[in-house]
Image (spheres, rainbow, N blue to C red):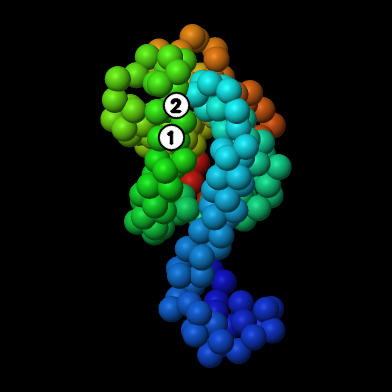
Amino acid sequence: QVSVDQITRDAGVSKGAFYYYFGSKQDMLIALVNRFADELFADLDARASALTGSGLQRLRGLLLEATGWKTARLEDALAFVPLLYKPENLELRHRLFDAWVARSRELFLPVVARGAADGSFAVDDPESVTDLLLSVWLDASARLYDRALALPDADAFVTTLTRGVAALTLAVERILGAAPGTLAVPVEPATLRALRDGVIRDLLVIR
């Protein structure tokens, strides 16, 4: 509900300066979310270039790095994650997710291809398998989050997400032909509660 007048006043800039860079508040939101994503992908790109070992070991390293990075910046994420789940921002969320899929593919395809080459993954077509993995990680996980968010209390939310993440991880391991548990990443209940509380507090979307 903030106005452009409030934004420019608090930032100490003119409205002309605001509209020089952003056509609307929505454009500013996109820029803020993209900056967060840019920093995450820059970190993962740097991490990927330093990883060693098999494809499986490298993939696990990337997953741990991504989880740790986002957990360490939970406060930043809570500044915009609730906004993405406002009904009027559904189109924005889909646009951003589509862009993140493309960037994630560039990051994970070489790792999957390496795993196929060194035998740590039972994969014949790394490109198709990478697309399938991204569908699980991004599309299915988004659906899981939406389903959990509609539940009536925090305990149900945490339980649903914890079980759901475990199921999605197992699906990824089976797709890759990896042993169960090799790609599991710890999920902290406190972090999940903070995500839910931020969305519910800001949006009041819980039924």
Residue at image location 40% in from the left, 28% down from the top = 113
In the rendered view, would you say 30 is above or below 65? Answer: below
Element under label 2? helix
CA gap between label 2 and label 1 equals 6 Å
Q: Is residue 92 left or right of residue 21?
A: left
Q: Which residue carries the number 2 mark?
A: 114
Q: Is residue 180 above or below residue 148?
A: above
Q: Are the residues tagged 2 and 1 within 8 Å (C-beta)?
A: yes
Pointer 2: residues within 10 angstroms few (<14), some, or many (20+)? many
Question: Callout 1, which amino acid?
Answer: Pro
Closer to the camera in the image, 72 or 207:
72
Residue at the image point whose x is 50% and y is 10% from the top:
180
- Residue 133 location, x and y as percent? 38, 29
Q: Give residue 188's quadrant in the image.
A: top right
Q: Residue at x 62, y 37 (%)?
A: 50
Judged left or right of residue 8, residue 100 is left
Residue in the picture at 60% in, 32% down? 51
Where's residue 91, x and y in %? Answer: 34, 56
Q: Is residue 12 left or right of residue 95?
A: right
Which amino acid, mark 2?
A: Arg
Q: Is residue 76 visible?
A: yes
Residue that badge 1 annotates:
110
The label on residue 156 is none
Residue 88, how many percent across, how many down?
A: 39, 59
Tell me the quarter of the picture where residue 130 sits. top left
